[in-house]
Amino acid sequence: MKTRLLIIIGITITVISAIAVGFFTLSSDDQQYSKENPYGFSAHVFYDPHFLPIMCPIQTDDCGTHLQLSIRSDVPAILQGYKICSGFSCVSQDHMQFSTKDSGIIPIFDGNKWNVGDKISLKVQVVTEYDKGITHSQPEPFYIDLGESEIAEDGFNAEPDSKVNVMCMTLEKSKDTATFFKIPSYLPDGYSFKCSFSGTPYESYMIFHNKKVPDGWISNYPELISDGAIFIFQTDEKRLVGEKEFAIYGSATQRIQDTYDGVMVENPSLHPQLIQINGMLAYAVDSCNDCGIQTANFTDGTVIQKHTSAETKIKFIDENGVKYSLQAGIPLNELIKVAESLQ
């Protein structure tokens, strides 16, 4: 009996010790954050339904977010990480390099557990903007506690001083956020630039058409493509995920080959092609009616297939780690000219 009592006491002390260690570990982590804010840094979390198709318009199944983070500062600064909590539920990200000089939007991955109106606490790791070309150590970061706020709806309406039509930017305005993207010098007769959008420094969206593009075009780009539009999506993958993570993706040539091989297995009726765009291997599909096949597999063994039409597509990755996806309602030979003219 005495032995059993000692064991119970020992277990109790061990559990209490573990809880105490965990508590003080969490507390020490929280204590590194301060209300001191030398940069006048501010941020807010918002939900905007217009941005759902923007986060990944080509492969919507990969979207794991419906919330975004908008940042500003009085003094140029770099966001290196954030920690957002609602009650005991938290999401965080570090190893970031997002300058407040970029008027962009940061997707909050795994943020779909919260809703508009939820109260959140927001803490950030911020460092002053510095010249990377000068040989010196990076400045020490500030860990700023921005306090509590609520998840807002429609982030741009929450910023009354914003006069930019974010859904239809000029190329110059998009370049203010994402400097890396290329613009085609060739367009088919009658086509011209209509709208662009760059929500982060890593992504660029452009649409070209021979007709007027309606408001909210990015939410309806598939219909516009079917109507003949040219949609160009560019992602600076290496900068987005970091050079180390990007290396895990494998070579550009192998990735394009894998895309081609996968389509040949799953949907050979699309007649995919491997072509060259300025010396780079590219995956391509010409538009066709009822050549695509969508397959639905049910748990009872039922399989339903549906024939679909396919738009013209070209995908390739350059030596700088930028991925290009072009979709259009024009023949492949014309879209190749557009892709080859990107500069």
Image: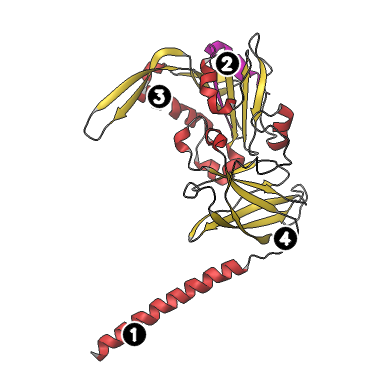
Disc 2 marks which residue?
A: 336
Disc 3 marks which residue?
A: 263
Reply above or below: 188 against 249: above
Rendered-image quadrant of the C terminus: top right
> In the rendered structure, which amino acid carries the disc numbered 4?
Asn
The front one of 5 and 318 is: 5
> In the rendered structure, which amino acid carries the disc numbered 2?
Ile
Precedes in sequence: disc 1 or disc 2? 1
Magenta residues, as a range?
322-343
The front one of 254 and 299 is: 299
**1 vs 2, front mark:** 1
Q: At x 67% / y 19%, what residue is drawn? A: 193
> In the rendered structure, which amino acid carries the disc numbered 1?
Ile
Left or right position of 340 against 130: left
Q: Report how far apart the C-alphas of labels 4 and 1 lie in the structure.
A: 47 Å
Q: At x 55% / y 71%, what residue is drawn? A: 27
Residue 37 - label: 4
Estimate the x, y position of residue 326 in percent, counting from the top left: 56, 23
Q: Kindly indicate whether the residue at mark 3 contacts the one at mark 4 (C-beta within 8 angstroms).
A: no
- Identity of the residue furthest to the left in this view: 300
Estimate the x, y position of residue 259 in percent, counting from the top left: 45, 28
Disc 1 marks which residue?
A: 9
Precedes in sequence: disc 4 or disc 1? 1
Precedes in sequence: disc 4 or disc 3? 4
Specify whether residue 200 is in view.
yes
Q: At x 78% / y 50%, what residue is drawn? A: 134
Precedes in sequence: disc 3 or disc 2? 3
Q: Report how far apart the C-alphas of labels 1 and 2 lie in the structure.
A: 75 Å
